[in-house]
Image (cartoon, helix red, strand yellow):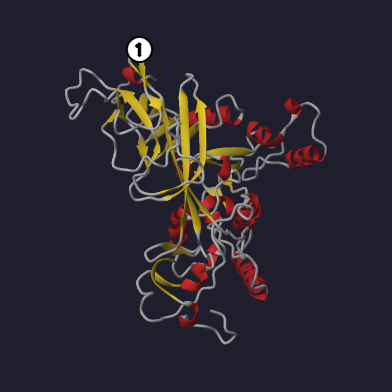
Amino acid sequence: EVVEEYEPTRYPHATKIFVNGSWVGVHADPKHLVNQVLDTRRKSYVQFEVSLVRDIRDREFKIFSDAGRVMRPVFTVHQEDDYENNITKGQLVLTKEHVNRLAQEQAEPPANPEDKFGWDGLIREGAVEYLDAEEEETAMICMTPEDLELYREQKNDEATLTEEEKRAKAEAEKREQEEDRNKRLKTKVNPTTHMYTHCEIHPSMILGICASIIPFPDHNQQQSPRNTYQSAMGKQAMGFFLTNYSRRMDTMANILYYPQKPLATTRSMEFLKFRELPAGQNAIVAIACYSGYNQEDSVIMNQSSIDRGLFRSLFFRSYSDQEKKVGLNYTEIFEKPFQQTTLRMKHGTYDKLDEDGIVAPGVRVSGEDIIIGKTAPIDQENQDLGTRTQSHQRRDISTPLRSTENGIVDQVILTVNADNVKYVKVRVRTTKIPQIGDKFASRHGQKGTIGVTYRQEDMPFSREGLT
């Protein structure tokens, strides 16, 4: 029933229906409606990215199709018995036929790409479903398909076994766990729990990219928020973000001189190609008290290692400009401005510019040096011309280097853009060396800023002489 015709007194227990936050109507039988809409999504009549959220307590059914919802895939589980099709409640929708078909496709790919089953086939068949954060709140997700099978067995045992038999079975399981210490700990099955609605594809899929590259995250149990801290700080790590960074003209880029493959890796790292594009170095770390300059989240670093290139990095910054049109007749021009003919010259030096007004690659530049020379016609109506004389023909609108930076001009690109306007990009390269105040961290959220740097001979060392 649409919201305009809704009478609260007639249907006091009706469920409100929302589409992207707008209340569109009410329904007297929400369970039937939810099952119907869910079925249409699983049969791909509506987009698989649409999320359906039923809030039983507040009597609301929310449908979302808007942008910006982060979604993740999980296996679906049958919710009803269907003896005609040999389906039992609590079984995965994914069958051996699906798995065999995928394996066969991998061995011999189909000649026609349209005949490919693949991942999209699993979504079309309803074996895999994408859930967003809000729908996940209303789902019961099992950790592994084995746990799902175990749960079904125990549910059946609950109905058929006597108390004595249940106790004997529990004792046998306990003994088995004690014999094999390395066996995975499984969650105790609560027989009062409702049936699971979904199942994880793999337990590691509950972690995002940043959490997936933490080695042994299950060992951070004494301080479990460390995994959360690392997930936030891993994004600040410096390595090299792309293999073609030397050809790109990004606004800013940080590149580590000597990135190393980590000694301890995770399986997810292999899939994410983290070993091919690593961030960080395998440093030797001593967790110890030493001189007091490493207290309260600070670290002492080996100055000799820094001098040999430890954690040294490149910083690139790109500057760009174009010759814009000013009115119909006048245009801005890339050129080397001269004091005699140009108004409003900047403080920095113009000596490093070539005749075309652009600095050459390989030139060392420092704060406020002009790297792109450009002039524009003088606006006759502008009264704020100051010290203009007859010889002043143009005004200066050059691009200087940032006052706090210095470096070497790395690359210059001179081209035209889509509107056939002259366009220039200049990339400046700076070497950054670790110094007091720089932040470092392990992959477990153990961060620290440099408090002091000592020479190699002043650092603590092991029996083998390892510093």
Q: Which quadrant holds the N terminus?
A: top left
Depth order, front residue of 425/244: 425
* Residue 98 in the image, given as x and y percentages of width and height: 73, 39
* Residue 122 in the image, given as x and y percentages of width and height: 66, 36
Q: Residue furthest bottom?
A: 463
- Total marks drawn? 1
Q: What crowding class fits label 1: few (fewer than 14 Cα within 10 Å), some (14-19), or many (20 or more)? A: few
Residue at 49 percent across and 40 percent down: it is 360
Residue at 49 percent across and 19 percent down: it is 420
Depth order, front residue of 222/278: 278
Q: Quadrant location of residue 99?
A: top right
Q: Quadrant location of residue 377?
A: top left
Q: Secondary structure at mark 1?
A: loop
| Residue 98 visible somewhere in the drawing | yes
The relative height of residue 76 versus residue 295 in the rendered view (above or below) is: above
In the image, taking residue 384 as reference, residue 369 lies left or right, namely right
Q: Which residue is disc 1 drawn over?
A: 328
Residue at 55 percent across and 25 percent down: it is 46
Which residue type does callout 1 highlight? Leu
* Residue 152 in the image, given as x and y percentages of width and height: 63, 52
Depth order, front residue of 410/287: 410
* Residue 264 in the image, given as x and y percentages of width and height: 61, 65
Depth order, front residue of 110/143: 110
Q: Residue furthest right?
A: 108
Residue at 29 percent across and 38 percent down: it is 346
The relative height of residue 18 versus residue 296 in the rendered view (above or below) is: above
| Residue 153 visible somewhere in the drawing | no
